[in-house]
Amino acid sequence: MKKRMFALLLVVIMAVALFAGCGSSTENKGADQGSTPANTEEKTYKISVIVKATDSDYWQTLLAGAKAAEADSNGKVVVTTDGPPSETDIDKQVSILENVIATQPDAVVIASSSSDATVPAVENAVANGIPVITIDNKLNTDKYTSYLATDHRLAAGMAAEAMVKDWNGMGIDPSGKKVIVISSVAGSKVNTDRTEGFIAKITELVPNIVVLETQYGENDIAKALNIAENTIAANPDLIGIFGDNNHMGVGIAKALEESGKHNEIVTYAFDTNEDEIKALEDGTLNGLVVQNPFGMGYDGVMHAMEAIEGKSVQKDIIINATIVTKENMKEPAIHKLLYPLE
């Protein structure tokens, strides 16, 4: 009897222990599940930013804007930057773009030197699900994600309007007098739009003005200087020069300074760098058509990030340009455009 009771008691104890063990196991499993964090790690997006040239303060400012967007992403974005040495190195830029696409980045932001040469690579990227944000120069394709740029024709027309206003203030009658455009490169849609925009507006405002044949400086300051010197020497009735980028502006300013003609010839140029700003302060240049490269670099990366995440991105975005003169360059908003990194 005692043996039976002992055996029964032993069975009960074992059953209770087994039940407790099972309960403990289930409880611990639940606790482990609750304490294991969900996989909330976000993917880091690789965005490649390619500019027209690395030898230009303008494009370095755009790259600084792209890097600022990287910093503001709190580790969500890694920006790599690249570009050919000069805006004339179109084949080099195409090669850079093709190599970048081969690495399968999450997005590409590009300021293309050519409206045509980079099109096949851009279309290939888009076809393979890589968003492409184009900046500054519009490509001859609709297969891109977004386009951010100045209206270059309109902005150049603003320079023509400012030039006519300056002539009026100086007591110069522009009728029958001469103006010239010194352009960086031929064949670029950006430069073509700037050249044509300036000429269209200046001839609208002064129908009988003489527009000399456009000269091309091949994005070389020394060549722009030489062109400006020769034009000034050969045309004593020259009253206006328009340079369509910062390298042309610097070359023109040097020619005006050396010839002593800066008080007689009104000059406007696109974009900014240290030399152009100094020439503006000195009165050698009358004005600059200033864009917002820092903002375009920043917004380009941000739009790329939105496109990667499947958000809606506006197809074409026009950014206003500003005419900067010696009179307004100290205004806070203008100063910020001239010195975006301060």
Image (cartoon, helix red, strand yellow):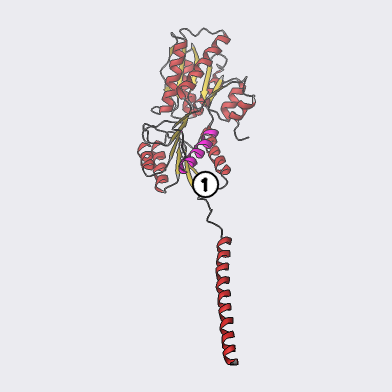
View extreme (front): residue: 1
Residue 103 falls left or right of residue 265: left
Is residue 166 shown above or below 224?
Answer: above
Q: Quadrant of residue 328?
A: top right
Circle 1 is placed at which residue position?
78
Residue 277 locus on image (x, y percent): 59, 26
Q: Quadrant of residue 140?
A: top left
Is residue 116 shown above or below 252?
Answer: below
Task: Depth check: give the residue in front, 204 or 249.
Answer: 204
Task: Depth check: give the residue in front, 282 or 291.
Answer: 291
Residue type marked 1:
Val
Q: Quadrant of residue 120?
A: top left
Task: Depth check: give the residue in front, 257 or 279.
Answer: 279
Residue 196 locus on image (x, y percent): 42, 20
Q: Is residue 204 magenta?
A: no
Magenta highlight: main SS: helix
Q: Which segment is the magenta one? A: 294-314
Residue at 52% across / 12% down in the picture?
Answer: 164
Residue 274 locus on image (x, y percent): 58, 30
